[in-house]
Image (tube, rainbow, N blue to C red):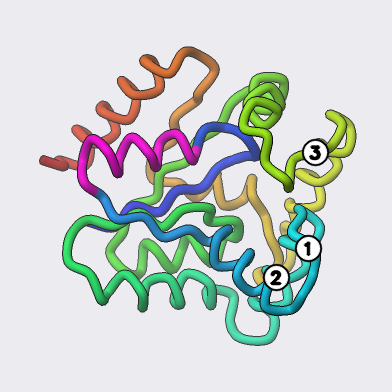
Amino acid sequence: MIIGITGSFGAGKGTVVEYLKKEKGFTHYSASGFIVEEIERRGLPVNRDSMIMVANELRASHDPSYIIDSLYARAEEHAGDVIIESLRAVAEVQRIKELGGIVLGIDALPEVRFKHILARNSVKDHVTFEKWLSQEKAESNQNDPTKQNIFGALKESDYTITNNGTMDELYQEVEKFLQSVDFE
């Protein structure tokens, strides 16, 4: 099984990934991790602005689904169920579906998501609430398939979880999702 995971900033994508890895034995491939590898190769600072720029450049110079195709090639080397996380463009969601995968979207209220990003203390998230909202808006390019469109990608999900509650509630929602796709 291939599960693509998309969602808004700080919605809980990483928490869902960790649950699926630990509880269900999935192997994880991260689009964000792939982009960070390229940022580091180029000697750029690892931050959200670099991530947006490099990801958009990769999609424009190769193909809108380049990042997903690259991660899928890595995943083909391993047997078992796979998660490809951090789908940020509509073309990436569509590519997961073309590959026979299912796309899970994770969303939450902006205030809840900002609280999540502060708690994870990632280098790419050291921003004010206003800057964070502006970055999110910058990742909503609706007219260019080579650019990030997180809310467009979220709308294309096969199943969406709203994560405004507790961790246990999130895990229950993940289990409902897995039951809906007949995962055993």
Residue 80 lies in quadrant = bottom left
Give me the C-alpha separation between circle 3 and circle 1.
14 Å
Element carrying mark 2: helix
Hey, what amino acid is under mark 2?
Ile
Q: Tell me, yes or no, whether the two marked residues, 1 and 2, touch with CB atoms within 8 Å.
A: yes
- Say which element carries label 3: loop
Residue 84 in which image quadrant: bottom left
x, y percent for residue 165: 50, 13
**Counting other residues with Cα less than 10 Å from the Cα at mark 1, is it few (<14), some (14-19), or many (20 or more)?**
some
- Can you say which quadrant of the picture contains the N terminus? bottom left
Query: Which residue is rendered at x = 10% and y = 40% of the image?
Result: 184
Q: Which residues are magenta?
A: 13-25
Give me the residue at 71% from left, 66% from top.
147
For badge 1, the amino acid type reads: Ser
From the image, tell me which residue sits under label 3. 126
Q: Residues within 10 Å of mark 2 (few under 14, many from 20)?
A: some
Vertical order, 26 against 121 (above or below): below
- The spot of residue 127 in percent (x, y) is 84, 37
Which structural element holds mark 1? helix
Query: In the visual, does 36 lie left or right of 98?
Result: right
Which one is nearer the viewer's eye here, 91 or 127?
A: 127
Query: What type is the residue that disc 3 sits on?
Result: His
In the image, which disc is placed on residue 50?
1
